[in-house]
Amino acid sequence: MLQHLNLRNVMFASMLIAGLTSCSDDAEPTVTPPTTELRTKIDYAKITPTTPYKSLFVDAKGDTTADLTSGNMRYKMFQALNYYMGSAVRDTTQVSATVLKNMYTNTGSPFTDISTATINIKGADLNASGVQLRDVTASSRTSAEADAAKANLEASFAALEAASKSVKATAAKGVAGKLGTYLVDAKGIEHAQIIQKGLIGALQLDLIGNVLLDKGLEADNSALVSGKKYTALEHNWDEAYGLLTLNPVYLAGATDAVRTSNESFLGSYIWEYNKASYAKVHPAFVKGRAAIVNNDKAEVKAQATFIRTEMEKAIASAALGYLSKWKSGTTDAARAHAIGEGLGFIYSLRYCTINGADAAFSDAILLGLIGSPNGFWDLTNDKINAASDAITAKFKL
């Protein structure tokens, strides 16, 4: 009985296999569809120093895939905050730490229209933008480090408000007021410069260099962001460019002697303090974006590293430059202004990660310079030289 059952099972299995084989002969063959590139590749030879940033980046319908909005909005918020800080001296008036903080967080519709020779801001656009400066300050750092950076800036908002109450007084050791055209606190510190240069580091350098052009390069580049014409990686690169400049060609027409285009903040100091490489930054941004289109990861990384390196070199060189200007200054006003800018740039060295700088390095230099009770008023050539030597060694300048 068992033998009969086994034989029957074997015969059934053989028939089943034969049937399956017969059916497979009639089945449609499986066809693997050809891989479709998201974009048409861009010839790097098309990129020149004057190629407008967005000109090469279009989809099959001819629509732009580059969106600079979020970067440009934050740039303009920085402009507006900086312009408001200047009102203390410009209008001989008290500034409000609350207003500054509202601008920093984009809370309570704080922005108004500004139209000058160099600034064109529609306040309603910034108020409705959905972006702010505070949430991206020191965003490459741990929560504790980012919180400390934000608290440091907000403390300077309060210090600027306090100093502005004495804007009609003449500053001296222990007395807040104006030195020449500069507003300083009782220690001779110009907090408007601390805030501006601190944001150049904690906002621009950190977000562009340590986030968007570093970890941000891991973003998806295979599909469009829902409802948008760009991939996540394309948008990260666009946001970085938009936070550096409002211009379609960064530093268009600039020579070593003359900066013809309107640039502010980090974009201005790259030109001023990195003469060897400032003209290469724009084509690096365009080539890196083209490399994203081409899925050329090695080229994307190379251009990102170049941009980050040259930005850090500008920050360190600016710190050295302003320390030198303190030494060459012939008035208290000139020296106080120089050290105010210098201190802000030294604070920002903590975001120069390509060169291995960190908060401990930055803070040690600041402490050596203004850790004494009278701050600016206690500065000496020896303190300035020690700070300069430390920066020169760390950045190999």
Image (tube, rainbow, N blue to C red):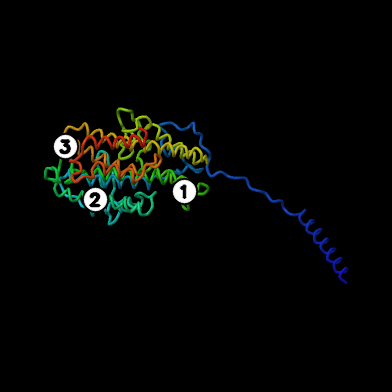
Badge 2: residue crowd in 10 Å (few <14, some 14–19, many ≥20) = many
Alpha carbon distance from label 3 to label 2: 23 Å
Mark 3 or mark 2: name the one nearer the start of the chain.
2
Please report the residue visible at 41 percent of the width from the left and 40 percent of the height from the top: 354
Residue 244: percent from left, percent from top? 36, 41
Q: Which residue is mark 2?
A: 157
Q: Which residue is mark 1?
A: 232
Q: Amino acid at mark 3?
A: Asp
Mark 1 or mark 2: name the one nearer the start of the chain.
2
Q: Secondary structure at mark 1?
A: helix
Q: Amino acid at mark 2?
A: Phe
Q: Amino acid at mark 1?
A: Ala
Residue 240: quadrant of the picture: top left
Badge 1: residue crowd in 10 Å (few <14, some 14–19, many ≥20) = many
Q: Secondary structure at mark 2?
A: helix
Q: Is residue 189 left or right of residue 200?
A: left
- Asked if the residue under mark 3 is in contact with the one under mark 1, i.e. CB atoms within 8 Å, the reply is no
Alpha carbon distance from label 1 to label 3: 50 Å
Where residue 332 is drawn, which disc sits there? 3
Q: Secondary structure at mark 3?
A: helix
Of residues 62 and 94, the one nearer the viewer is 94
Residue 334: percent from left, percent from top? 19, 35
Residue 180: percent from left, percent from top? 15, 38
Q: Is residue 78 left or right of residue 180?
A: right
Q: Quadrant of the C terminus?
A: top left
Please report the residue visible at 13 percent of the width from the left and 48 percent of the height from the top: 166
Residue 384: percent from left, percent from top? 25, 36
Of residues 83 and 345, the one nearer the viewer is 345
* 1 or 3: mark nearer the eye: 3
- Asked if the residue under mark 2 is in contact with the one under mark 3, i.e. CB atoms within 8 Å, the reply is no
